[in-house]
Image (tube, grey):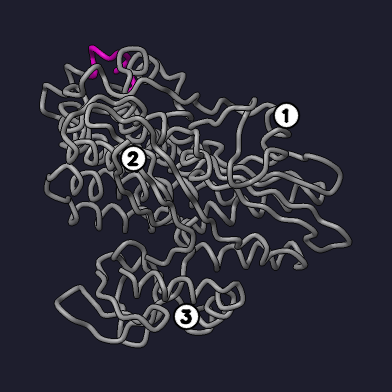
Amino acid sequence: MCLAIPARIESLTTPGNAIVNLGGVRKEISLALVDEAAVGDYVIVHVGYALQKLDEEEALRTLQAFAEMGALDELREELDAS
Amino acid sequence: MASAGKLELAVAWDGEMVRDATIKSTRPRADRMLEGRTPQEAVKLVSLLFSVCGKAQSAAAEAATAVAQGREPTQTRSRATACEAMQEHLWRLLLDWPALLGLSKQQAIFVRWHGALNAIAAGAGDARALSDELHRTLTGMTHEEWARLDSHAALIEWIKSGSCVPVVAALDALESALEHGGSTETCDLLPEWSTTELTELYESGLAQPHCAGRPMETGALARWQHEPLLRDILRQRRSRLLARLIARLHDLLDSANNLASEQTAPRIHGFATEANAGLGLVHTARGMLMHHARIERGHIAKYCIVAPTEWNFHPRGAWRAGLMNLRERDAARVMEIARRVTLSLDPCVEYTMKMHHA
């Protein structure tokens, strides 16, 4: 089961790409599948693509739920190792 | 990325053939988050936790909790669930398989169709135009012509005609080159569900589900195993790589045609397992997704989720069967084949794969 951890867009890079902050780790992704994503928006990232935008309130609520189940620590370890 | 849970896949090879294929898995226990909440809160939380496959997860949660409360599951999420499954199929056909086989990714058309399916899921968009375009581009046929393709011989003729999506021809060539047709083991395909089987599924637990005591393969091939074309491919070939890809294409095109003709193909099912408990089942792109909920005094007392990956990457399941006794003397080629078997079963979590000498 692929959990959907929200990532915040930190900067726009080459056209159509962005740097996101995923649990404290930065990663470049494609914005090709979402409309009008801007710096500060939260998105769900799936294998290198932003899949959908989330409003901030929903994103923070989701991050809180993941924090409760310890998934963010695990994600950080995975990203640091990769 | 955005994953939790992981598969560690290992292939044991003796220089001549694959002697063993083992799987270690960890799974996210998101289901425990749902216990103690009301059914409404649980359905909402599921849609937050699983946005990647969120439509199917929400539909399964809604069906399980509805049945547990004595209501019939609704099909209100059918359209969105079908669109989500189609987007996943397109991802594999246009991005992942081309990348694995050294072909060009078809990103531009993928992005366009992904967007069209978002619009259709939201009740807008032109489902007939999309269905026609999918059939024309991926098969060179109309829906009626595709439906008439009913044998392995006809499939080969279609592949030779050059009008099929490129990954089909590439995978056919690679599979045909396998020595002795590939591995010597098979894994049974998950059948349609009877109440007895469902009760056993529920009782068989989570991480290693089984049916009639045996692990089973789930996915588009299991769903469409009785279609004449797929039945004949399974008869003619030992390896299931091409069969799984054709089944995926069939599921995509069938869903496209259903959306265009406003039919509701039932992807969502609900069954009562005992008093105040229900199973929600959804056909996803990867296979059968199962949610089980027991409700006591208006709150979730017990919740469990079985994802398709738990079936297909069972330690004695379809992934292992796809590699056992595979004859190949080139180590790099063994790993290439193992990667293809893995993608054909499409795990929904991150995985690592290594080889060691048996």
Q: Which mark is residue B11?
A: 2
Mark 1 / mark 2, whichever is N-terminal? 2
Task: Mark 1 and mark 3 in contact? Answer it, CB < 8 Å.
Answer: no
Identify the residue position indicated by label 3 in the image.
A55
Of B49 and B77, nearer the camera is B49
Q: Quadrant of residue B251?
A: top left
Judging from the image, mark 3 belongs to the subunit labelled A
Neighbour tally class for label 2: few under 14, some 14-19, many 20 plus, Cα within 10 Å: many
Q: At label 3, which amino acid type do we have?
A: Asp
Q: Which element carries disc 1, helix, strand or loop?
A: helix
Label 2 vs label 3: CA separation? 44 Å
Of B311 and B244, nearer the camera is B311
**Is B213 on the left or on the right of B129, as rendered?**
right
Image vertical order of residue B348 relative to residue B215, above or below: below
Identify the residue position indicated by label 1 in the image.
B195
**Is B250 on the left or on the right of B104, as rendered?**
right
In the image, the segment drawn in magenta is B147-155
Question: Same chain for marks 1 and 2?
Answer: yes
Does residue B148 appear in the picture of this structure?
A: no
Task: Mark 1 and mark 2 in contact? Answer it, CB < 8 Å.
Answer: no
